[in-house]
Image (spheres, rainbow, N blue to C red):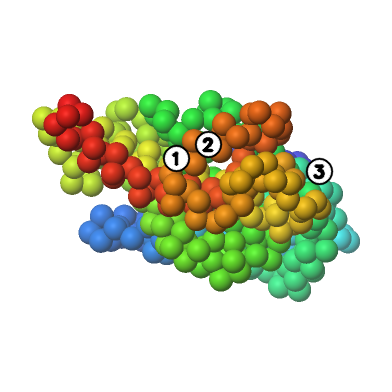
Amino acid sequence: MASALPPVQGAVPLAPRESEPRFAYWRAELRERRDALREAFFAAPDTPLLLREHARLVDRVIRGIWAECAMPEGLAAIAVGGYGRGQLFPHSDVDVLILLPAAGAPPAAAIERFFAALWDIGIELSHAVRTIDECESEMVADVTIRTSLLENRFLAGARGLFRQFRRRFAERMDVRLFYDAKALEQQQRHLKYQDAIYNLEPNVKESPGGLRDLATVLWIARAAGFGRTWRELARNGLMTIGEARAVSRQERFIGAMRVRLHYLLGRREDRLVFDAQGALARQLGLSDTKAKRASEQLMQRYYRAAKLVRQVNTILLQNMHGSLYPAATQPVPIDSEFQQVDELLDMRDEGLFLRRPAAMLDARRVARPVALEDLEELRPVDLAEVVVAGRVVEPQLRVRQRQPENL
């Protein structure tokens, strides 16, 4: 991560003097309030509330330390990344960017002391120090930095400099390039996890069907102006209200798993490791039965949530792709039920899968004889109908499997 102040990156050499009572005050305040947030979560679990309140607590502490350090005028402290979104998991890094004015020598000693104070009181930082020009060059070169800067909030300092930063960022954002980069990044991330939801120790943040899949959709939607929440995406026609509610439920469930993992293990651990699965299951009130251990029940719940997240991610990415890259060709009929739209298979009559579920199997059979190698995915509207039809058909199949003649 480039910086105008190389010594600031990495280990911080300076430390605040313990004789300064206000640093001790902020250390105690952070610890006590974090303990209170933990107790409140386990008393009445509410993941979105916890994440918001934790971010607000850290906001207040950072502003307090900024004032205690008497930071020079002309600088701005900005929350970026997940912290910039206003959500902070218990042991996540706190992403902070210090914006420098274009002219003049940077106040290295003051910035180092500010960062050292934050580390000392218990805030685990992921920090950078840049001018606006440096932010621009970095975001153009690195999609990860571009994504981090997309979600930004003012914390302290020169508000005018922050407004300049936001204007420059908006001017330099190429939505199509951003979409392509994030879609490629997701493909590479999925391959790292064997492109599989059903890993034995899934990473609830990074694995396919994890929280990162939802964040990817919202990042692109935000950059393109489609909305910042699931409800806004539904209002803009990218998903239905029912889908928005369903994905919100699963986001809360997976988010709660991540919160509980952090608290249980006392560190930033996003994998549902074997050693934690039993304890997490007991926290959720699950118990062993003759058929399944509590940990197996927990993992089945997680896999169902991850499956829905993966489906919604695919549908929404295709919907946004269709909006950003409108179809350039007319539909090409394949048979009486299917047609080709660009490189995607499409139903000629909406409702086909609900009326005749076997058509979901026919879709793959139809694509092969046409020799369309790229015709591997359904259009978003058809994918959504597959999800709905699957929910209708699956209970019917379970009933048939339980009938005596099928045992």
What SS does tag 2 mark?
Answer: helix
| Contact (Cβ within 8 Å) of mark 1 with mark 2 | yes
- Foreground of the two, 305 or 390: 390
Label 2 CA crowd tier, 10 Å (few <14, some 14–19, many 20+): few
- The residue under the point 37% across, 34% down is 272
**In the rendered view, does 109 fall on the left or right side of 338?**
right
Among the 4 quarters of the image, the one containing residue 142: top right
Query: Residue 358 got which mark?
Result: 1
**How many numbered marks does the figure carry?**
3
**In the rendered view, does 247 fall on the left or right side of 114?**
left
Three-letter amino acid code at the position of disc 1: Ala
**Residue occupied by mark 3:** 141
Q: In the picture shown, does residue 278 fall above or below 328? A: above
- Foreground of the two, 259 or 31: 259
What SS does tag 1 mark?
Answer: loop
Residue furthest bottom in the image: 160
Query: Residue 362 got which mark?
Result: 2
Residue 118 in the image, given as x and y percentages of width and height: 54, 53
| Image quadrant containing the C terminus | top left
Residue furthest right in the image: 103
- Foreground of the two, 97 or 173: 173
Three-letter amino acid code at the position of disc 2: Asp
- The residue under the point 77% across, 53% down is 330
How far apart in space, not on screen, are marks 2 and 3 (Cα)?
44 Å
Query: Residue 55 got which mark?
Result: none
Label 3 CA crowd tier, 10 Å (few <14, some 14–19, many 20+): few
- The residue under the point 57% across, 27% down is 192
Residue depth check, mark 3 versus mark 1: number of the one nearer the observer: 1
Residue 82 in the image, given as x and y percentages of width and height: 56, 54
